[in-house]
Amino acid sequence: MTSQLYPYPIKEDTVQIRVLHAINTKFRALTLHIANEGMAKVQWRSKLKQMGLVKGSPDLLVAWDGRVAFIEVKRPRTQHHSAGYLSKDQKRFKAKCEDLGIPYAMARSEDEAVEFLKGLGCPTKPIWSA
């Protein structure tokens, strides 16, 4: 699915919140945010690395029925900004996932994330009628 051109600036964290909400609403899965934002002080980033944080880690880990997938959320293209792209470290992480057979996707919208998980067979939540 191709990302639409947004007529207004949209921040990556806003997209991530929307993606997370869509996943939690539609799927029977455990979704975790990997806190890998680069705004932390050098000492804290060093400690996170010692504790196991890997450079290029994606934003979200989604697990279901003994399976796991990663999603890296990027800002979509707008009239004011180009679309977000993977850094060198993120490309390396993606390549490691591909080598290990772990599903990995970059999503610029809720729809892209939902289609990725549907394609993997992630179970949807039952829809109840009143």
Image (cartoon, rainbow, N blue to C red):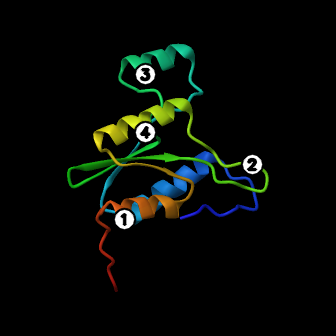
Which circle, 4 or 3, is nearer the viewer? 4
Which residue is found at the position 51% from the left and 64% from the top? 111
Which of the labelled discs sits on residue 94, or is there none?
4
- Amino acid type of the residue that numbered disc 3 sits on in the rendered structure: Leu
The alpha-carbon separation of the residues under discs 4 and 1 comes to 20 Å
Q: Are marks 4 and 1 in contact (CB under 8 Å)?
A: no
Helix, strand or loop at label 1? It is helix
Calculate the distance from the C-alpha at mark 2 to the C-alpha at mark 4. Answer: 24 Å
As measured in the structure, the alpha-carbon distance from the residue carrying label 1 to the one carrying label 2 is 29 Å
The residue indicated by pointer 1 is 118
The residue pinned by badge 2 equals: 81
Picture layout, residue 35 above or below residue 51: below
Q: Amino acid at mark 4?
A: Lys
Q: Residue furthest left?
A: 66
Q: Residue at x 69, y 54 (%)?
A: 77
Choose between 41 and 120: the one closer to the eye.
Answer: 120
Q: Which residue is mark 3?
A: 48
Q: Earlier in the sequence, mark 2 or mark 4?
A: 2
Mark 4 or 1, which is nearer the eye?
A: 4
SS for dot 3: helix
Up-down relation of residue 4 to residue 58 (above or below)? below
Residue drawn at (43%, 34%) of the image: 93
What's the distance in space between the residues labelled 4 and 3, CA to CA?
20 Å
